[in-house]
């Protein structure tokens, strides 16, 4: 339970302000403007403990509250309040956020909602470790996996019949497919299927799935929210108090908890999210435009491109187009195979970092199929570019020289 006082105008502030102002200590003369890093494994407690009281730091920890408060306010997007209606037409509760030790710990908590023998509808392209975990759960607990093209709304709706959980990524990792969020989340609600949206790529500044009817929003906080490639963390956000209690219990019993300093770092990173994401998105759109005209490029995926299959949908439901680009270098006549060609580009960059992960201030790229667990329908020569906040001309000249390297 959060002990951080909620901003009195939480529902009136813009996201760019919430990232700066939420999760601060209560104002007091001479008081701290930043939360401290409380280092406690336990708290003074006697007798029967109420849910609002701190007792043991695996169950609840005041080090988590400022970040959780800020993320909940962001995913609520200024629409929280008992007077508002949700996508199902019911009264809306303010969102609650739970921080986890990693994005994968958050994925595991969500998958724990699946009953043995249940059915999970999931994108054919999505973060690969989540896909591996889904396969393990399927084998061990008899869960049926229904893979869908998440951009194919009819296919998603058809797959919901008798399902227990819908996992959505949008845009997907690494193929950047864009789901029709209002349509698929509305259909899941109508069919009584719980839905979770991995909002890692878009961030709450890019889209707010709870407003479209998602039951749970998932984040790899490791990426844009923390933003500096120095911490691994995850989070879940929901407006359903019973679901929050179930997910919190999973976190407590499985011990998937975050350390106080990591959460402090994430909040510190969050303060600049609006600026970082605005810059990264603008640079990504510019780089995608130039890459689409580059003589050494065969294919570019970025929802900002007018010809991209996800363009119209992203324009309608997102604020911006994200900062991840998919690129396939053009094969050269008589030269190495496409994989070798893509690897050569990764080897040739000097400013871009050859590394996995995304969402940091530093631009990174990698060939996704170098991971054996990546979906086999992802092209072997697809490079995933995570655009950071460096000068866009420096990023361009490095990419250009790497693409032209013999
Ligand atoms: N979801 C997406 C879309 C991701 O890209 C990742 C990691 O790359 C995860 C979840 C898992 O997060 P973490 O690495 O913080 O466990």
Image (cartoon, grey):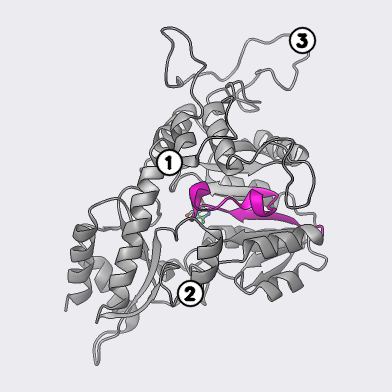
Asked whether the residues under the numbered discs 2 and 3 touch, taking CB atoms below 8 Å apart as contact, a structural biologist would say no
Name the residue: 48% across, 23% down.
24
| Range of residues picked out in magenta | 192-216
Name the residue: 32% across, 76% down.
292
Dot 1 falls on a residue whose secondary structure is loop
Crowd around label 3: few <14 · some 14–19 · many ≥20 (10 Å): few
Q: How many labels does the image show?
A: 3
Dot 3 falls on a residue whose secondary structure is loop
As drawn, is 327 to the left or to the right of 167? left
Q: Where is residue 365 in the image (x, y as percent from the top left)?
A: 33, 62
- In the rendered image, which residue does mark 1 sit on? 226
First-in-chain label (2 vs 3): 3
- In the rendered image, which residue does mark 2 sit on? 378
Look at the picture and state if 153 lies above or below 85.
below
CA separation in Å, label 1 and label 2? 28 Å
As drawn, is 193 to the left or to the right of 109? right
């Amino acid at each position: 339970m959060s002990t951080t006082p909620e901003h009195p105008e939480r529902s009136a502030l813009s996201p760019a302000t919430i990232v700066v102002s939420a999760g601060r200590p209560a104002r007091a003369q001479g008081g701290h403007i930043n939360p401290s890093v409380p280092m406690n494994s336990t708290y003074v407690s006697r007798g029967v403990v109420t849910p609002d009281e701190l007792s043991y730091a695996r169950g609840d920890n005041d080090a988590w509250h400022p970040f959780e408060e800020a993320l909940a306010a962001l995913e609520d997007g200024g629409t929280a309040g008992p007077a508002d209606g949700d996508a199902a037409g019911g009264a809306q509760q303010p969102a609650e956020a739970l921080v986890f030790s990693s994005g994968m710990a958050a994925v595991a908590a969500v998958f724990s909602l699946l009953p043995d023998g249940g059915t999970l509808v999931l994108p054919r392209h999505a973060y690969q470790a989540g896909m591996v975990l889904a396969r393990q759960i399927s084998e061990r607990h008899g869960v049926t996996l229904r893979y869908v093209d998440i951009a194919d709304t009819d296919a998603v709706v058809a797959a919901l019949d008798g399902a227990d959980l819908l996992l959505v990524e949008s845009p997907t990792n690494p193929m950047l497919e864009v789901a029709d969020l209002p349509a698929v989340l509305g259909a899941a609600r109508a069919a009584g299927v719980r839905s979770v949206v991995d909002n890692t790529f878009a961030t709450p500044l890019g889209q707010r799935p709870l407003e479209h009817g998602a039951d749970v929003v998932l984040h790899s906080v490791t990426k844009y929210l923390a933003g500096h490639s120095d911490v691994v963390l995850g989070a879940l956000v929901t407006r359903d108090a019973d679901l929050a209690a179930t997910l919190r219990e999973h976190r407590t019993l499985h011990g998937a908890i975050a350390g106080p300093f990591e959460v402090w770092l994430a909040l510190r990173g969050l303060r600049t999210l609006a600026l970082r994401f605005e810059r990264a998105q603008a640079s990504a759109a510019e780089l995608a435009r130039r890459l689409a005209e580059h003589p050494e490029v065969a294919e570019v995926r970025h929802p900002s491109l007018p010809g991209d299959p996800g363009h119209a949908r992203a324009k309608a439901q997102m604020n911006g187009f994200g900062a991840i680009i998919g690129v396939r270098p053009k094969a050269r006549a008589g030269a190495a195979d496409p994989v070798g060609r893509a690897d050569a580009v990764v080897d040739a960059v000097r400013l871009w970092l050859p590394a996995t992960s995304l969402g940091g201030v530093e631009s990174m790229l990698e060939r996704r199929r170098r991971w054996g667990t990546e979906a086999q329908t992802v092209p072997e020569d697809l490079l995933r570019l995570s655009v950071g906040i460096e000068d866009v001309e420096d990023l361009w000249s490095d990419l250009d020289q790497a693409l032209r390297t013999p």
